[in-house]
Amino acid sequence: MTASIGRGLVLLSLLCATAGTVAAFAAFWKKRADLTTLAVRAAYGFSASMALANLWMVAALLRNDFSISYVAQVGSVSLPTWVKVVSLWSSLEGSILFWGGVLAIYIAIATRSLNAAHGWARPAAIGAWLACATFFGFLIAGPAQPFATVVDVPADGPGPNPLLQNHVLMAIHPPFLYGGYVGMTIPFGLALAALLSGGLSPTLLGTIRTSLLAPWTFLTCAVVLGGWWAYEVLGWGGYWAWDPVENASLLPWLTATAALHSAILTERRGVLKGWTMSLVIASFLLTILGTFMTRSGIFNSVHSFTQSSIGPTILVFLGIATLVSVLLLGFRVDLLKPDGELDRGASRDTAFLAQNLLFVLFTFTVLIGTVFPLIVEAVRNVQMSVGRPYFDRMTIPIGALLLFVMGVGPALPWGSTSREDLKRRLLPPLGLGTAALAVSLAFGVRSPWTLVTLFFAGYAAHVTIFEAFRPARNRMKFRKDGFFKAFSQDLFGPGLRRLAAYIAHAGAVTAFIAIAVSSTRATSVERSLKQGEEMTLGRYTLTFEGIESTEETNRTSLIARIGVRKDGTAVEPLRPMMNQYRSQRESIGTPAVRTGLVEDLYLSAMSIDPDGQTVGLLVLINPLVSWLWIATVVMAVGGLLALLSSGRVGRTIEAARDLQAEPVR
Amino acid sequence: MSSNDGRKRVALALGACALAGALLYFVVGGIGNNLVYYWGPTEVLAAGPKAQGASIRLGGLVEKGSIVKGQGSNMSFTVTDGKKSLPVRCTSVPPQMFREGIGVVVEGTVAGDGVFESHRLMVSHGNEYRAPDDPASIDLKKLMDSTDGLTATGKQ
């Protein structure tokens, strides 16, 4: 009975989405406002019923209602409440239902934010969103049905995958990832609407930018949270392995970041409209490709194709979406006529172009490395993977160049300028760059790419800080305002968008430094320790003091207590664990990390002897890893502030147009 | 469209093609040199000297009675797929589950003396895959897959 209510809600949402798609496109072709109203109602109908279906599933998980197939598959009476709630997205069927739920929220908000100023792009966009909603409604109602009725209702279920139960990040990471992935549907729909209606008005462009910022912010967090989860749970000591699953989350982030930047050129110069739309569309298609790669089980086995129809269904959707996008771009992109032209030479325009090309290059490199093994396996039935050296070798130079552009770009003026002015702008930041280089040499950094990265990072840091405070400083200088008054005008005025961009850049520079140092300056050792035995790594002396064990509702854990002395002083002992989950064969380790601003001490128990005599330990000292987490928070704050400033975006665009009208110096 | 515009377009297209070609060359070259092969003992032995120095993920069962613990975390054992066997030298601390007869995946390469040298040892994970009692009936693909996601080939 409860299962059929869930099925009913899903079918209702599918019905709303289908009817809404038809109504919206009919409204667009026939230019009928009454049909637009109908489509808007259908959009809200989809959102409401899909959101309810999600709540219904959560309620079922909390009530241990094993008559619903998904609950019987991932639920368990013994689970803590938070695990029951997050079980919604712990397995394939539920995660697709959750996708529908997130899409429901996005479509409701986006539909509300469109108004008469968007013209006939409004029904076209709603139609595109609801077409995507129709697909996911179909996927949930058909191949991925989580609300199937279980005939022989079991007394208890197995609980979700223990690796996922192992850390609270499981509760946080997927919502961020879905917030990013699903949210790309909105700018995608708007871009299709721009192509369909054959025009990209400043209003529409502003909405695209705003709708891109929300998923971008989520995705920024999700990419790093994925790394953090790997760091805190998997126990191999690093946060990024160029794993297909990780790459899948990185790819749309790369194109979305490129799109956010090229949208600025489009806004200011009225150029690259088709290019910006292509990047927006690519971001969406890459999220679907990512879902196909990670959710269809293709990386577990190509042959699960025959067992599950979810993978092929997603692939068909990807094919249709790609075809529609390519056809629309091919036939209608010429309608998006440029209103201006790019400045050539050493100007910010050129820097933006370079940034875009580098991001696209980055995307291709990662995409090819990720998809290549799939193609080889499909064609020749040979299993292989592309090793980490490929990704490192290809992406490190591109990353360094990006950092260079992030330093030089904002220092350059819009439009051309004199040689003296260029020198005045470009030379001072060399100071901080050189200082960064000197400091890293003093700390014994010798790897050339790390040195290059740190030099560029110093340069970019100078430019970022200088530019972030430039308007405030000018006000202090010319109006004799105090610092707080001058700065608050940026924070609460139309200058917020500019400030937000530099906050995001500051986060990015920090991330570059953290990645460059942590990936090349880590030290590690693997040792078996007997009880009472000591070992030393860097400034740390570790002693294996003994084992403890704990019992929780869903697991028993063996814990190795490792005494830690740093420079001879005893600090808090670390407790790497080995967890045995009920109804799972294998035990799974949880590493213990002593987090610090300078370096992390990372202990991972690879094996714990049950009689407490020996422990196999992987010990790492990872420098500056915490700064990657901090950098991400800073970037996300930048994204949020930019989102906040988009309410003022109309004014910003007017200001930009005014600037453009000014004669070039 | 003036002929000047047309010429510009052709030049632009040629430039783009050249750039794409160069990119493809580097990317394909980069991939070719960094492939990790998923092989069983039979494939490794069939590859002969080609296997020396290549990045290989070797999968199979740990042969009964073959585990010899050395100093520290050094250890040697034999991996079999029921048809052929390959001796393995391993320097990483074995995971909790490691024992005779279990399905393992080791990462490394074949050394000059024909022994597989590994810096990374993984045991099959998850409930989907259980190692069979008879080594001949092992499904290598499933074994490899069962360690996927945990592989995190971070250390090279």
Image (cartoon, coloured by chain):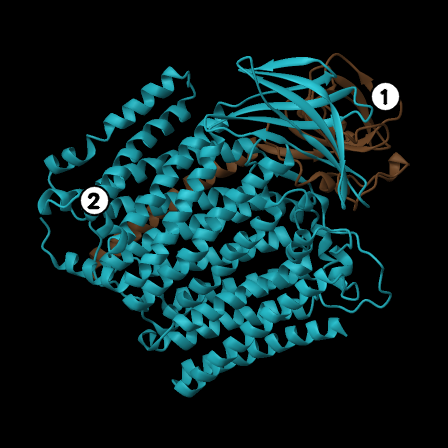
Q: Name the spot of residue A556 as percent of width and height, x first.
A: 77, 38
**Quarter-of-image position of residue A292:** bottom right
In the figure, is residue A97 to the left or right of A219?
right
Residue closer to the observer: A398 or A68:
A68
Q: Name the spot of residue A104 as percent of width and height, x first.
A: 53, 68
Measure how far apart labels 1 and 2 are at the Cα level.
67 Å
Residue closer to the observer: A635 or A346:
A635
Category of crowding for the residue at label 2, using alpha-carbon neighbours closer than 10 angstroms: few (below 14), some (14–19), many (at least 20): many
Residue A387 versus residue A251 in the image, above or below: above
Q: Residue at x 86, y 32 (%)?
A: B82
Amino acid type at image mark 2: Ser
Q: Residue at x 22, y 45 (%)?
A: A484
On-image quarter of the N terminus of chain A: bottom right
| Disc 2 secondary structure class | loop
| The residue positioned farthest toward the right in the image shown | B134
Amino acid type at image mark 1: Ser
Q: Residue at x 55, y 48 (%)?
A: A248
Q: Dot 1 corresponds to which residue? A: B66
Q: How many marks?
A: 2
Q: Dot 2 corresponds to which residue? A: A347
Q: Name the spot of residue A426 as percent of width and height, x first.
A: 20, 34
Q: Which chain is cyan?
A: A
Circle 2 chain: A
Q: Name the spot of residue A136 as percent of width and height, x first.
A: 59, 67
